[in-house]
Each structure stands twice: as C-alpha cells, then as structure tokens.
Amino acid sequence: MKNPLLKRLPKELKADLGKYLVIFLFMTLTIGFVSGFLVAGSSMSAAYDESFEKYNIEDGNFTLSSKASQAQLERLEKEGVRIEESFFVEEDADADSDGKADGTMRIYKNRTGMNLICVMKGELPEAENEIAIDRMYADNNHLSVGDSIKIADKDIKITGLVALSDYSCLFSDNSDMMFDAVKFGVAIMTDSGFDSLGTTHLSYRYSWQYDKAPKNETEEKNMSEDFMKALARNVSLTDYIPQYSNQAIHFAGDDIGGDQTMMEVLLYILIVIMAFVFAVTTNNTITKEASVIGTLRASGYTRGELLKHYIALPILVTLAAAVIGNILGYTYLKDICADMYYGSYSLPTYVTRWNGKAFVLTTVVPIVLMLVINIMLIYRKLTLSPLKFLRRDLSRSKKKKAVRLPAFSFMNRFRIRIILQNKSGYITLFIGILFANILLLFGMMMTPLLSNYQKKIVNNMIAKYQYMLNVPEDEEEKEEETDSEENKLTLMGVLQKILTPSLETKTEGAEKFCVYSLKNMPKNHDGESITVYGIQDDSQYVDLDFKDEGVYLSDGLAEKYNIHIGDELTLKEPYADDTYIFKVAGTYDYPAALAVFMPIQEYRNTFDKAEDYFNGYFSNEEIKDIDEQYIATTITEDDLTKVSRQLTVSMGSMFYLVNIFAVILFAILIYLLTKLIIEKNSASISMVKILGYENKEIISLYLTSTTWVVIFSIILSLAAASWIMTAIYKVIMMDFSGWLTLYLDPVIYPKMVAMGLGVYGFVAAMQYRKIKKIPMEQALKNVE
C-alpha cells in the first residue's frame, strides 16, 4: 500500500518553498562550480601529465659559463644521459611599441628533440623576422597573431601563439617566489632569426634525459645528484635544475591538484552547514507537529517511517541540486573554470574527459553527508514515546527550572529567553557566519596585502639598480688530468686582474658588493634559495652597522623560519656538499627576498675570494660604461614587484568572486535561521498581538534578540577568522619560495562589519513583513 505520508511532501514543499528554493539554488551553483572545477582540473591535469611523453620533456637542464666542447659532452653522456643544446637569448621586449621596454623575452630556437612545442594559434615562424610567442604573455600584453613586437630594437612579426612544454608556468628564475606572465615571456624563432640576435645575452643552457628512466622520485633525486657531481668535475656550472624541482615545469601541475583538494573541502564544509540548517528546521517542524506525530505513532507508524518522511525533502533537494549542478558543471561552468587556469598558466590544449570520481564527490558524497547528519540530529527526537508527542513534551530530562536571569528590564529578559530557546539555531548561525567571514577575510585581505607588499618593496629597495656581474673565469676545458688546484687558482687570479678594469664603472654613486646564492636546510621542508650579500662598511645603500659578530637576515627569512637573534643559520652550496654556519646578529627590513647580509670582507674570507673581489653594483643611476657581456642580471623595481603584479593579474577576479560567495552564504544563513526562529515563535508572536502589542514592539522583541546574536557573531567571528587565517596563511606560504608578510588592513574589519549588518538589515526587512502577516488566530490553534 502506498504510504499516505508521501502526499504531504508536495504540500510541505509548497508551504516552505522559499527556504527550499534558496537552499536548492545555492547548492546547485556550489556543486556546479565545484563539479566544473574538478572536471576542468582533471582534464587539464591529464593533458599536463600526458605532455611529459607527448612533448618529450627534459629530465633537467644545466647552464654553463661557456659553450661545452664536444669532448666534455661526450664525457658527460657516459654518465647515462642524452644531452641537447637549449641555448636561449634574453632580450628587452617592447609589446606596445611605445619605445620603452615592457619586460623581457627569452628566445629559443625551434625544438625538434626535447621540450617540443604546442601551437595554440597560428603557426611556427619560417622567416628570420618572424616569431611565435607564449600565449599567456600575448594575452596579458594584448598581442595576437599578425601583430609585431619589438625585441632588441627589431620589429618582429608574430606568426603564432604557443605553449612551451617546459614553461607551463612562466618562471624566469627557478628561485623566484612567483612567476611573471606579464613582463616575462618565452618565444621561438628560426635558427637564422635566433643567430641574428647575437651572443651578448646568450645563455649556454643544455637539457638532458636519462637513458634509463628512474623508477621513483627517490631514484630520480639520487641520479640527479650523481649527475650534478659529474658536471661539477667536468664543466663550469652556473645553474642546475633537475626536472622535479623545476617550477616552470611543475608549479602548474601541483597547483591544479592542490586546487581540486581545496574545492572538495570547501564543498563538504558548505554541505555540512546546509545539512545542519536542514536538521534544525526539521527539528522545528517536528516540534510544531508533535501532536500529529504522536497520533501517527499511536496508529502504528514506526520511527523509521517517520524518519524517512522528514529527511525526504532535504535528500531530494540535495539530489536535484547535485544532478542539475553536475549538468551545469560539465557544460557551461567547466569552460569558465578552464579559462581560469588558462588565465594563469601556459598549458597545452586539453580535451574534456568524463570524471567518475568528480561525479561521486559532487553527488554521492553530498547526499551521504546530508543523510548522515540529518539522521543523527533528527532520529534521537523521534525516539520519544507517542505519549510525549501527544502532550507536546519533547524534553528528555525532568522538568528543568528556567534559567534565572539578572534583574534586567522585561523586554531584555524576554529577548534573552528567545535566545536561550533557540540556541541550536543561533549556534548554527554563528558557525555559518564564522565560515563566511573566513572566506570574506581571505577575499578582502589579498588586494591590500599585495599593495602593502609592493609598497614595502619599493620603499625598502636597496637601490634603483642592482647589477649582478659575470666575473670572467678561466675558460679552458676541464680535463681529468688538469693542472693542480694551485695552478688553477693562480691562472684565475691572473685572469681576474687582467679583466678587472672592464668591470669598473665611473657612474656616480655606484657601490660594489658581493652576492652569492646558497640553500637553507630546514628540518621539515625542502630548502630554498637564500641570497647572501657582502656589503661594504658604511654603505650608502644598506643601513647596517656590523659591529656585532654575525650576520643580519632579511625580516622575511627570520619570520618564515622563526629565526631569532643569537640562533645559528646553516646554509649549503646548491650544487655541492659544502655547508656554512652563521650566527644571527639581527634582522634587516628587506621584503624583496630571503637574504643574508654580512661585511664584504667577511664574505670574501668565507667564500675564499680575493681581497678586491666583487661581482655586483648598487646604483641609483643606470650604469652604461660596462660591457653588456659582463652584466648577468639587472634587478629593478619591475623585477622586485612581479609577485604582487602577477597575483593581482591572475587572482584579482578570484578574490572578487570569493567576496561575493561569502556575502551570499552569509545572507542565506541569516535568512534561513531568522525565518526559522520567527516560525518557531509564530504562536507566541500571535499571542502578543492579541495582548495588544504593535508590530514595531513585536519586532523589537524578536528581531532585536537575533540582532544581538548577529552582531556578537560578526565581532567574535572576525577575531576567530583573523586567528584562523594567520595559522592557515603561514602553512600555505611555507610551500612557496620566498615570503609575503601577512598584512590585515584595519580598514577591512569595519567594511566586513558594515557588509554583514547591511545584509542582515535587508533580511530583517524581509522578516518584518513576515511578522506583520502572522494572524492573531494562530495562537488559538494549538490551545490544549
């Protein structure tokens, strides 16, 4: 026989259509967006994983101070690797043809062996004055096929937009904290076009692949370390990047996987909150229908049948939201999510793939969560005896005495009673507001954080220009039967003295310094690049007094690794086993990098350099009298601010969406729970109307109590959200190279309070209309 309770479901849905519609729309959009994100992400991830074989991506690359001889390459290939030239030229690029350089372009010859190219639009260059540039760089600089770009003062025609398989993320330097797809790009030219750029800015990079692929990550790491030692014995190594630590290759892939996990967690938190809202409202319905439930139980209906009835609508709403959300996710929303990835990374083309796991995660898991939470919170109440339901006595314990309240005014004591009677709903409201404020704080803090970081970098720049020099070294081949170490040092010393005049400048205010890159050795994390500066005494650029023994750390380095004055810092050579231990004497405000500062003479002694050795200049004026071939890198404001610039470009719209999502969640929770409280107290409201209270007075009683809770929840949740965000932020930043000091702009908090109260004011106005519509006769319906 058909269960007659089923006939009640359409009536209940119609009677509470507003609540179910709001929850349905919110869950549909949430599930749809997460589903689209997972589908796009898994499709992108599959295309990314396949690209290693499809485009024959290298196992690593190394850069030499000069071109390797054939004999050196043959010796290296005996180590079980295949080596291929991957030379590049890095030149200034003028994307908008205004006569000023907008950034740099790293140009390679067309690849035919390793690191093949995916042509996204147009075609590869065929003539000397043609070029194919990275699609991401082109989008950010408003370039397209057929346009021209000025590189090294030459107008070159763009024939295609490409994705280089070894640059899925545009890192110009592997030690950088953030990639830069605005002012740094990669490109392909023909052999003749590449040669026409000259050798002034030519880098001798080589890519390698193992003859026998490593079985796992541990073996890969061991093989790369063995090969690095072989390189150090045979050639003059200036850079070495095994594939597993190459951010340009792996950053995008790691980020896609991490984003999917984050979205799943976000979905489940929201489902749990919605499940609690359903459970609280259902418990309220059970209280209202207590006598009906008592009659049904006395008539033979089991607890299980009643439980199925009361959880039917929450499950049906969740199922409908999951189905429609997945349809939206696989059609419209997955393209939006894919565009978000393409807006940050230079990924190859992908094909949408069915993702069974995503379907389970966005359909089965939400329904299970909704089912379990509602059963846990509803079934216990249904275990009461039919007699208790008939008497409308749903308490489990003996009759409790009312909580004794202070001698407040009648109105305030009445409001406190309302809060105590609806504590479960208000607790759910607080949890929801807390979660919404965590999201809102994240969305609102990032723009001022990045602005503050950029401002601090500009205000604390050491100099307008930092020139890193290519100090000439002995260019003869390293043979196994070379001269003694003493002779090599002598030759290098003589050569340094001969060539030192070419490194001198007459630029006013230019100051010599030393710089070197080491790697730290933290206990629970991989090491990262630490820049070590040797600073002259009484430097006009670095305001440090080296009277105390020890070195000074940039404040970001000290903050990230919790290093204090008097601690010891251990650093090691990136490509060798040599380690250095430094005592920390203090910190220096330099947010641009993780850095160590020491006196220049101590630097020379520590790293065994000549008495007059230097390899860099600080200057507030551009240096023009040093040959460009001896300038390895020039660091300017543009280089130091690329983190904030790129994050603003890549994630600016995401921050805005997070803010909107948080406000919508906030509004929905307040609407649902204030609606619940008013419905739960509708008989009392009707009674006070009979007693002569006006609507304004009734609102003062019932909405004011909710207003107290909302204001208290907003303020308390802001403090809790700040504490939670501080903890989460440090964990997140530990996975990145570099450090952005957390900055919570004080202006954010009044804005968040104003937004919360504004949303509540709008919802309260809606509930005011509902209170006005409650009839007086409702108080007489359940009179016993």
Image (tube, rainbow, N blue to C red):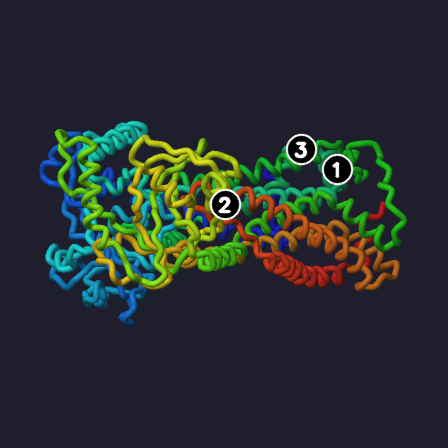
Q: Which residue is mark 3?
A: 303
Q: Secondary structure at mark 3?
A: helix
Q: Residue type at mark 2?
A: Thr
Against 171, residue 58 (above or below) is above
Q: Secondary structure at mark 2?
A: strand
Q: Which residue is mark 1?
A: 294
Question: x and y percent of residue 201 in the render?
Answer: 21, 55
Q: Earlier in the sequence, mark 3 or mark 2?
A: 3
Of the two numbered discs 3 and 2 in the rendering, the one whose residue sits closer to the viewer: 2
Question: x and y percent of residue 329 in the render?
Answer: 42, 50
Q: Is residue 267 visible?
A: no
Asked if the residues shown at circle 3 and circle 1 are in contact, with their CB atoms under 8 angstroms apart, the answer is no
* Quarter placement of the C terminus: top right
- What crowding class fits label 2: few (fewer than 14 Cα within 10 Å), some (14-19), or many (20 or more)? many
**So how many labels did they put on this image?**
3
Q: Residue type at mark 1?
A: Gly
Q: Secondary structure at mark 1?
A: helix
User: What's the distance in space between the residues labelled 1 and 2, CA to CA?
Assistant: 72 Å
Q: Which residue is mark 2?
A: 587
**Left or right: where 335 falls relative to 231:** right
Question: x and y percent of residue 548 in the render?
Answer: 50, 41
Asked if the residues shown at circle 1 and circle 2 are in contact, with their CB atoms under 8 angstroms apart, the answer is no
- What crowding class fits label 1: few (fewer than 14 Cα within 10 Å), some (14-19), or many (20 or more)? many
Question: x and y percent of residue 495 in the render?
Answer: 18, 45
> Residue at (66%, 52%) from the top-left corner?
714
Q: Earlier in the sequence, mark 1 or mark 2?
A: 1
> Residue at (31%, 65%) from the top-left corner?
142
User: What's the distance in space between the residues labelled 3 and 1, CA to CA?
Assistant: 11 Å
Instruction: Using the image as rendered, state which of residue 113 and residue 173 is in the foreground.
Output: 173
> Residue at (50%, 57%) from the top-left corner?
452
Q: Residue type at mark 3?
A: Arg
